[in-house]
Image (cartoon, rainbow, N blue to C red):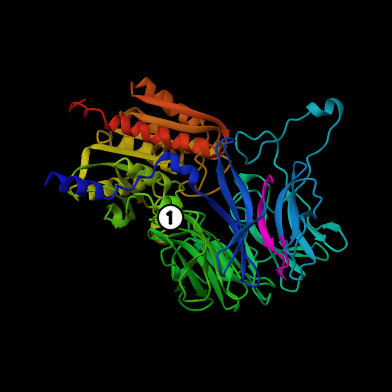
Amino acid sequence: MLAAAVVLVLAAPAEARRFSLDDLAAIVRLSELQIAPDGRRIAVLVGRANLAENRHDTELVLVDAASGAARALVSQRGGLALPRFAPAGERLAFVAEASGVNQVFVLSLGGGEPVAVTRSTTSVESYAWSPDGGRIAYVAADEAERREGTARFEDGFEVGHDGYLARSAPRASHLHVLDLAAGTTRRLTTGRFSLATGLGPTSLSWSPDGRSLAVTRFDTPYPGDAHRSRIAIVDVETGALRDLTGRPRLESAAVFSPDGTRVAFLHPRDADPAAGAEAFVAPSSGGPGQSRSAALDRNLLWLLWRPDGESLLVGANDETRMGLWEQPLGGPARRLDLGPVVEVSDLSQAPSGAIALVGSEADRPEELYLIERPGSAPRRLTRFGDAVSGLALGRSERISWRSEDGFTPDGVLTFPPDFDPARRHPLVVYIHGGPTAASTTAFSELAQLMAARGWLVLQPNYRGSDNLGHRHLLGIVAGAGSGPGRDVIAAVRAVQARGYVDAARLAVSGWSYGGFMTVWMLSRYPGIWRAAVAGAAALDLLDMYALSDLNVMPRHFITGSPWTGGREQRYRDESPLSHASRIRTPTLLLSSVGDTRVTVTQSYKLFRALEDNGVETRFVAYPTAGHWPPGPVRRRDVYRRWLDWIEERFARAPPTRGR
């Protein structure tokens, strides 16, 4: 009997290893793909973690659409971005650094080395091939004024609608056209307006006859004015510019129809800056156009013409996954079959209608997929995620619940790999940012790291998320924290009602707007949380209005000045910082000192408030720019601190009742 037992033990399969911080370096990042005009090849950027240098090394890779075979075309070039096939498919352009400035390079796919074709004095920000392949239109910022002698120190600048970290006035970006055969470049636009601010979608679309370009025009280059955008048509011969619709703002992402008679673009429902984007179509000769996707009732993230010119390809968050639809110019949208693909981060379409996309599945990070024809499911072409998909991962499922005010939000519940419904498990609430975004059941690094530690992970799509339609999206306007807070606490109670949550070990966490909601939950629902992590937390709506790079741009709750119309007190009431004195939960704060979106000043304020009230707290700041500390090493460090802070407090004995 003993011998038999030994044999059984030896024969038992080893438990699969769980996802860990060390596995983050194996995750490959795919971006900026384009499918060739003949649909037979796909160009995509592939980024791999370089821990020694804390960066992702990026290669431009060509993937065969039939076999999935891949070969690197370009590597070890700084600024590598935007691969674009020439219309005939024999050349591939891309952006890369040359002498400190990003230029457009062209590579012959028949052989040879890439050649820089632009000579811009500032970095190329976007570009597009002309329909005949003989010209390249590109957008670049104006040069800074050059000063000599003591004039070098006359560097004061007038502050406009920019963030508090600005060190100079922003420069406008304008349109140029390069004639490849002649080697000459003409500047087409000039003025105080700008064709790119780095915020929101911008566009550069040639008309099929090559005579016009559709662009998104911003009234100024200041980032806070990004909502003052309109579609304009530029005459390539004369540089004359005319507005397409006459609307003063909130238009973006224009693209000419295949026959050139119409222009599709994104514009929010009822011109409401807090509403989701819809697909509008207007005559290219001009006119207001009309929405073609209102019945779909989703906030559109992608917009392309289908080759027939009678329908659009659109994409959006939909419940706890993403969806792609064919939207006819008249009639209901038809959903495309995405098979196991839950989330789409980029896509490209061939003239045949084939669609290449970067997507992720529930148990697999980003891969390259191909939808060869309407009605067919995506076929996966790459296997970059094999090292992760073979691990013991937590299962994720969509849940929904009833909240107050008639809302029925949804969200994602991820279970630990060894989940046992007969046991009580810690629960971590992980709140997405945006708030115009959504959590999906796609592979999530942080959710899986949490599940690997034995925790249930709840990701609620509170009102203001963009996955449940117009009413749900606008539900946040009545209260930036109060309405979403009711949704989040209702989600926690719904999961607790299932009977497998350890009520003594609850944590709440999030980044950006998720950090906002984390601190809101700590102050409005005290006494239930054992630990909290608030990253890059937007805590003071007055600071967001005055100091952020978005500042006065209408969005979400911030749809008017707090200093007019009697709004000041409402802004204060809906700011988590105003209620910080109520917080008693041990809280970790994380932020980058150079974050232009959510100023680090807000975390300093909360840190002082928590310290002064005797709350256990720690504030870790990264000496970096950006809304998230850049590079794979810092990403791992953020996750490690986040996870360890919660785990250490879960391990403690529960606090004595009444404390």
Predominant secondary structure in magenta?
loop
274 in relation to 638, above or below: below
Judging by the rendered image, the residue that carries numbered circle 1 is: 364
Task: Pick whichever, 374 or 295, lies toward us.
Answer: 374
- Horizontal and vertical percent for residue 202? 63, 56
Q: Is residue 615 left or right of residue 378?
A: left
Extent of the magenta region:
75-92
- Which residue is rendered at x = 35% and y = 34% of the image? 532
Q: Secondary structure at mark 1?
A: strand
- Horizontal and vertical percent for residue 200? 58, 52
**Residue 83 within the segment the image draws in magenta:** yes
**Residue 566 within the segment the image draws in magenta:** no
Residue 36 lies in quadrant: bottom right
In this view, which residue lies farthest toward the front?
3
Task: Pick whichever, 132 or 386, lies toward us.
Answer: 386
Amino acid carrying label 1: it is Arg
- Which residue is rendered at x = 26% and y = 47% of the image? 418
- Horizontal and vertical percent for residue 62? 63, 60
- Horizontal and vertical percent for residue 119? 82, 50
635 in relation to 292, above or below: above
Q: Is residue 146 left or right of residue 293?
A: right
Dot 1, crowdedness within 10 Å: few (<14), some or many (≥20)? many
Q: Is residue 194 visible?
A: no
Q: Is residue 587 left or right of residue 308?
A: left
- Which residue is rendered at x = 39% and y = 32% of the image? 578
394 in relation to 597, above or below: below
Task: Pick whichever, 497 or 270, lies toward us.
Answer: 497
How many labels were placed on the picture? 1
